[in-house]
Image (cartoon, rainbow, N blue to C red):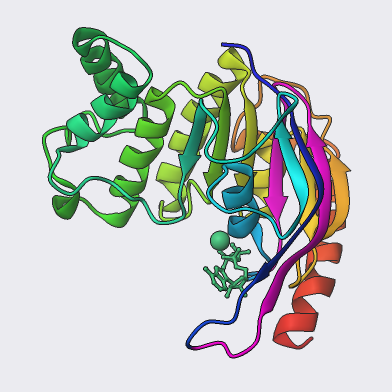
Amino acid sequence: MHSPDIDIDSVSLRFAPTGEAARSHLALADVGFRVKPGEFVALIGPSGCGKSTLLRIVAGLLGPTSGTVQIGGKTVDGVPEGIGFLFQSDALLPWKTAQENVVLGALLAGRSRTEATERASFLLAEVGLGKATEKFPSELSGGMRKRVALARTMAYEPRIFLLDEPFSALDAQTRIHVGNRFLQILETLGQTVIVVTHDIDEAIAMADRVLVMTASPGRIAKEFIIDLPRPRDYYGSRFTPGFRDMQQGIWDILKREMDGVLGG
Ligand SMILES: Nc1ncnc2c1ncn2[C@@H]1O[C@H](COP(=O)(O)OP(=O)(O)OP(=O)(O)O)[C@@H](O)[C@H]1O
Ligand SMILES: [Mg+2]
């Protein structure tokens, strides 16, 4: 499927005062960047800087206070078709098995029941859950649920992936396995991707470009072009020349922003 570009132009978002918060809260201030068709962008920034909020705006789940988002030249106003969104919390249907949750993604993509079942089995095996297909979400660990959710998002065959910390609940070894499978699939399909992560190494290993955000209100502090060759290895990339310098560069900016929040 054709992968469109994403154009985020001067997006600001102010949350209105709520019961708990007496004042309005400026979550995003003048955020702007473009994601080229098929490009993989990683967003990294201090907790609370507005990363999830920004993804929700791109997905049309939340309207910006000012600024616009365009996908494939069309202004986002409501949820556009073909967006694969992986929420920070896994959001599986509790009354459906792992297999049925993933089948649903494929059915939404217009696949027949037979194709959807095959695809679900394939993707669950890819994320290391071939033996857990008949389990319900309540019978799975946090990391397993997250992998089911990732498989479901992939089953939907979206034009654009918006992934909010897709591997955050996974232990280090599973993360490498799933990260590699995910990279292989994406490098074959070439979809447009924005992924939010807290892991600098992961951001560099996967993305074409890493955008570091400032502490709240979030804006883009700096962009890093990651010109490592593809196909990449989720873990092995860390040992390629130049990796440490990029890691250091990103950490310098991130540390500065985090010191402002946590106290340096
Ligand atoms: N629905 C809401 N109403 C009011 N304030 C909100 C709402 N959602 C988020 N916020 C606030 O907006 C800011 C940004 O939140 P967001 O969830 O986007 O941060 P984040 O960068 O994704 O953080 P984390 O890395 O911890 O997931 C926070 O201060 C948060 O409290
Ligand atoms: Mg978040």
Q: Quadrant of residue 23?
A: bottom right
Q: Residue at x 70, y 55 (%)?
A: 44
95 on left or right of 75: left
Q: Residue at x 80, y 82 (%)?
A: 260
- Residue occupying image coordinates x 57% and y 42%: 59
Q: Is residue 240 above or below residue 106?
A: below
Q: Quadrant of the N terminus?
A: top right
How far from the left and from the top, in percent, is residue 18? 52, 82
Residue stretch in magenta: 20-46
Q: Residue drawn at (56%, 39%), measured in percent from left and top?
A: 162
Q: Is residue 198 visible?
A: no
Q: How many marks?
A: 0
Q: Residue 79 at what x, y percent from top left?
A: 52, 38
Q: In the visual, does 161 lie left or right of 14?
A: left
Examine the image and state in which quarter residue 127 appears: top left
Residue 96 seen in render: yes
**Picture coordinates of residue 213 (x, y %)?**
78, 60
Residue 31 highlighted magenta (yes or no): yes
> For this rendering, which residue is in front, 237 or 33?
33
> Where does the C terminus fall, quadrant-wise?
bottom right
Please state the horizontal and vertical placement of residue 222, each as a whole percent of the image.
Answer: 88, 54
Front residue of 76/146: it is 76
Quarter of the rendered structure image containing ligand 2: bottom right
